[in-house]
């Protein structure tokens, strides 16, 4: 249910992983590569990952956010070169109630961006920049 790879993300497969009869809500978040960052044009992104640690941290973050509640989670984050429009990360969450599903999904993406060792380089016509490194 947790994956870090160079393979394209199959959102339907992640949805299927969390689908169950008890779920009154399924929330899907897709992080998509966009063509800009602020005022700068972005041509593509390059993600690097410490795969083993990233996978471990994805699981830890999900477990902490779920905190024993009846919530199921599946996450797939890509690394490597991603083009505009590609899905970089998908998080699928199911819960008996929508509020819990939305809260869990939001909490997971926020923590993932802060704690999971996956780094993003934005590449554009004006050069490139690693995001989230340094001051």
Image (cartoon, rainbow, N blue to C red):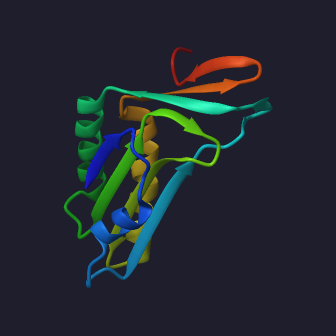
Which image quadrant for residue 130? top right
98 or 77, which lies in front? Answer: 77
Q: Point out residue 72 in the picture as x, y percentages from the top left corner.
A: 27, 65
**What percent of the width, then of the height, locates residue 53?**
25, 30
Image quadrant in which the C terminus is located? top right
Task: Give the residue drawn at x 26%, y 79%.
Answer: 20
Q: Which residue is depicted at the point 42% across and 41% down?
A: 78
Q: Name the one closer to the observer, 113 or 11.
A: 11
Where 97 sits versus 103, above or below? Answer: below
Position above or below: 1 against 132: below
Q: Quadrant of the N terminus?
A: bottom left
Q: Position of residue 57 (x, y in %)?
A: 27, 38
The residue lying toward the viewer, choosing from 114 and 123, is 123
Q: Is residue 29 left or right of residue 19?
A: right
Quadrant of the image occupied by residue 27:
bottom left
Q: Is residue 70 above or below residue 133?
A: below
Residue 41, located in which quarter of the rendered image?
top right
Total numbered badges shown on the rendered structure? 0
Residue 90, position as x, y percentages in the image:
44, 54
Q: Please give the name of the residue rendered at 31% of the width and 75% of the height, measured from the top-left corner.
A: 19
User: Which residue corresponds to the image point at 62% horizontal and 19% vertical from the top-left?
Assistant: 129
- Seen as rendered, the residue at the extreme right is 39
When the figure is inspected, residue 34 is found, relative to residue 102, above or below; the finding is above
Q: Residue furthest front?
A: 7
């Amino acid at each position: 249910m947790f994956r870090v790879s160079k393979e394209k993300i199959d959102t339907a497969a992640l949805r299927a992983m969390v689908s169950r009869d008890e779920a009154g809500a399924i929330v899907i978040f897709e992080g998509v590569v966009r063509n800009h960052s602020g005022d700068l044009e972005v041509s593509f992104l390059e993600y690097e990952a410490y795969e083993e640690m990233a996978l471990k941290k994805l699981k830890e973050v999900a477990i902490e956010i779920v905190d024993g509640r009846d919530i199921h989670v599946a996450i797939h984050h890509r690394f490597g070169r991603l083009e505009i429009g590609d899905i970089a990360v998908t998080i699928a969450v199911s819960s008996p109630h929508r509020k819990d599903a939305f809260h869990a999904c939001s909490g997971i993406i926020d923590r993932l961006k802060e704690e999971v060792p996956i780094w993003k380089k934005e590449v554009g016509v004006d050069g490139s920049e690693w995001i989230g490194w340094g001051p």
